[in-house]
Image (cartoon, grey):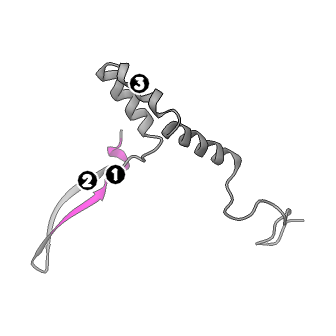
Amino acid sequence: MPQKKGQTGNPNGRPVGSKNKRTEQWEKLGEAISTTHTERFNQCLAKMDDEEFVKAYLMTLEYFKPKLARTEIKGDVEVSGIKQLIIEPASKKDKG
């Protein structure tokens, strides 16, 4: 028989707000990269030529800084004597 809404089959399960093991592992890896292994990582980056460096840097950065959504400038509009620039998210067809 299905559970009632708001009930669980395991009332003593994981507490609300606690992190799963995968999340904890990912956070530990990020911490190790950003503290313990920083010097070694920087040494490896220093040995790369410019093109390799940029690729490695950007690939690594994606894990720690989210990419911004593309925006599209539609034009300016005057409202109450004040010009406003309208910026909207780019349509899905523009993404490539």
* Front label number (2 vs 1): 2
Residue at image coords 20%, 58% = 74
**Cα distance between the residues tagged 1 and 3:** 41 Å
Cβ–Cβ below 8 Å for labels 2 and 1? Answer: yes
Residue extending furthest right?
Answer: 1
Residue nearest the viewer, comparing 74 with 28: 28
Q: Which residue carries the number 1 mark?
A: 91
Kind of residue indicated by mark 3? Gln
Q: Which residue carries the number 2 mark?
A: 72
Q: Is residue 18 left or right of residue 67?
A: right
Residue 91: in magenta span: yes
Q: Quadrant of residue 39?
A: top left
**Cα distance between the residues tagged 2 and 1:** 8 Å
Residue nearest the viewer, comparing 1 with 10: 10
Marks 2 and 3, the one that precedes in the sequence: 3
Residue at image coords 42%, 23% = 44
Q: Which residue carries the number 3 mark?
A: 43
